[in-house]
Image: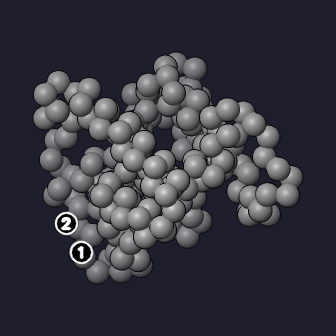
Amino acid sequence: MPLSEIPGRIFLDSSTLQTLQDFGEYIYDGEEISPNNKIWMIPDGINNVEALRNIMLVGSRGSLQLAISHNSIQEVLDRGKFDYLTWALEVVDYWESCIYSYEGNSNAFSRQGLLLSAKLQENQFGYLSIKDAKLISDAIILECEVFLTMERKLPRNYAHIERELGIKVLQPIGYWNLLEPWAALLG
């Protein structure tokens, strides 16, 4: 994939947002993960956390836009954890700073996402849960190029979603595979 086609606007699924918080000491500070942590038992769990660390290292140089939405915040509120909400609001601040960096904010969006998101109402997306459909709709409206999730089920439909909606649904490992060859140049 050419450098110009590397997706830079990333929507963080709730599972990814939670993982960033749960493993923040490792992802952002390089602390060790306890060998007793359940992440070691989840298929590709530790590999996805390591990929998130690499993605965030590239993102810390300002080359990635990390987005969440009102529906994301609602999912966080539904969890009822104050520290998770605090973390989510920090990500909202980061996302808003990305948008405000565009001259006059109006250049941040082409409005094509609004048109594409209407397709989610079609029967062909009946396999999506209501929550997933809302978040994917948000990601499309926000014109994100990647929907980053820790879930294993949703990425199985990546080809259909990408073909119909123009957004890649990836686990961190998949996104890191796209980003890694260019990571040194993106920052």
**Horizontal placement of 175 versus 30: left or right?**
left
Secondary structure of the residue carrying tag 1 is: helix
In the rendered structure, the answer to whether residue 54 lies left or right of residue 4 reads right
Q: Which mark is residue 118?
A: 2
Q: Residue at x 38, y 36 (%)?
A: 94
Tell me if mark 2 has few (under 14), some (14-19) or many (20+) residues whose alpha carbon lies within 10 angstroms of its own. few
> Residue 117: x percent and y percent?
23, 61
Q: Is residue 172 above or below residue 53?
A: below
Q: Quadrant of residue 184?
A: top right
Vertical arrangement, residue 11 with respect to residue 156, above or below? above
Given the image, on which type of amino acid does mark 2 rest?
A: Ala
Q: Residue at x 26, y 26 (%)?
A: 101
The alpha-carbon separation of the residues under discs 1 and 2 comes to 6 Å
Where residue 9 appears, as percent x and y from the top left, is: 37, 40
Residue 88 circle label:
none
In the picture shown, does residue 185 fall above or below 158? above
Is residue 117 among the parts visible in the rendering? yes
Q: What residue is pinned by disc 1?
A: 121
Q: Kindly check if marks 1 and 2 are in contact, taking CB atoms under 8 A apart as contact.
A: yes
Is residue 177 visible in the rendered structure shown here? no
For image coordinates 30% across by 58% down, the residue present is: 70
Q: Residues within 10 Å of mark 1 (few under 14, many from 20)?
A: few
Q: Nearer the viewer, residue 82 or 29?
A: 82
The picture places residue 38, in percent across and down from the top left corner, at: 77, 62
Residue occupying the point 17% across, 56% down = 114
Quadrant housing residue 53? top right
Percent position of residue 27, x then y:
65, 39
Give, as a three-letter code, the residue at label 1.
Gln
Left or right of residue 63: residue 53: right
> SS class of the residue under badge 2?
helix
